[in-house]
Image (cartoon, grey):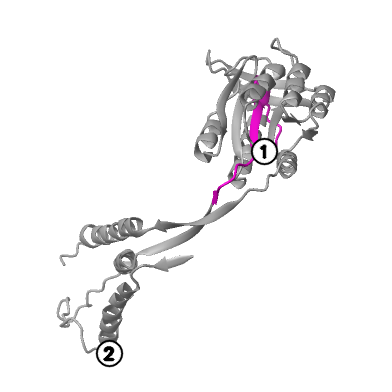
Amino acid sequence: MIDFMNPFAFLFFIPVLFLFLLRKAKVFSSPAFPVILSDWGGSAFKWKGGFFKFTAVIKTALFLAGYVLVVLAFADPVIHHDQKVYVSRGNDVLFVLDVSPSMAARDMGGLTRLEAAKQVIRFLAEQNTGASFGLVQTATEAALSVPPTTDRKTFIEHIDTMTVGTLGEGTAIGTGLSTAVYHLASSKAPEKCIILITDGENNAGSIHPETAASLAFEYGIKLYTVGLGTRGNVPLQYTDPVTGKVFNGYLESDFDPAPLQKIALMTDGRYFSAETVAGLSAALNNISNREKVVQTYYLKTVDEYFYDKILIAAATAFALAWILSRIVLKEVF
């Protein structure tokens, strides 16, 4: 809801309106004398500069806009937002995201698989303010990027900076899952889950995915798996972050979803197939609804002020009006 802390500032519009009416009624106007600039019997001088007429109109409009903005700034507009402040803990969600080179395949509606995953995860995190989100990246190796946190800014910043190839060229699903289990095992959240998003099979690492799934079940952590991408030949291009070498070509995309289905069922989770951005979004929304936790909260009013921003806009309008007046139109006063 928008409000004005100093509504009496709008009274400054009255003198301007009064002056306008007086000028219209010819009561108050600048003195003017007709002067004919021509030879005796010749044609009178006429100003045919359409550009200058248009510029004069723009100058006047900018000056009036600046005045309106100054009055609006002194009225001190403020927008009141209701913000939820949770007093009970939500669930912990730890994403395990495949960042192997195959995630650079561009078969998700013009996006690469990694770009699509980042986009959907970012949207889910922004919509679910009560849960704690974390991130594990996995390829040949695995690394925790963000532990479960309610700090959306930090989480989204790490999501945005992810690139393929930073952890090798393999897909160590078991290593990624065990890393996630390790960081969720001691969590006191009412619900804990891992969401694995990958486009391939386990082909690296010393830990079998089923071993990691068994550990997850032991600690009461549900595992959801998402198989990402289409099948067949798909275009792929990425730059190796270590060597700077650019790889460009086609990827023969195909993997067996059965292992992903099995490890999900081992923890009472579920497997999803996502060949489009919409399909991935539907899968993550389904998981979010399954893992919802009822939380208690209160509403806190947060005020957003615009005084300084409006004054900057007013100063810009006045500056542009001055430039048009003195430099373009060559006006003296």
* Mark 2 surroundings: few (<14), some (14-19) or many (≥20) residues within 10 A: few
Q: Nearer the viewer, residue 41 or 106?
A: 106
Give the percent coordinates (x, y) of residue 234: 73, 26
Give the percent coordinates (x, y) of residue 296: 61, 51
Give the percent coordinates (x, y) of residue 321: 27, 62
Circle on res. 25: 2
Residue at the location (67% across, 25% down)? Answer: 103
Quadrant for the C terminus, please. bottom left
97 left or right, relative to 158: right
Q: Quadrant of residue 60?
A: bottom left
Residue at the location (53% across, 29% down)? Answer: 161
Q: Nearer the viewer, residue 318 or 147?
A: 147
Residue 90 among magenta residues: yes
Give the percent coordinates (x, y) of residue 241: 54, 18
Looking at the image, residue 4 lies above or below residue 290? below
Check if mark 2's residue and mark 1's residue have beta carbons within 8 Å.
no
> What's the magenta region?
85-108
Residue 76 among magenta residues: no
* Circle nearer the N terminus (2, 1): 2
| Marks 2 and 1, how far apart at CA | 75 Å
Residue at the location (70% across, 44% down)? Answer: 292
Looking at the image, residue 13 lies above or below residue 72? below
Looking at the image, residue 10 lies above or below residue 79? below
Kind of residue at disc 2 = Ala
Circle on res. 190: 1
19 left or right, relative to 293: left
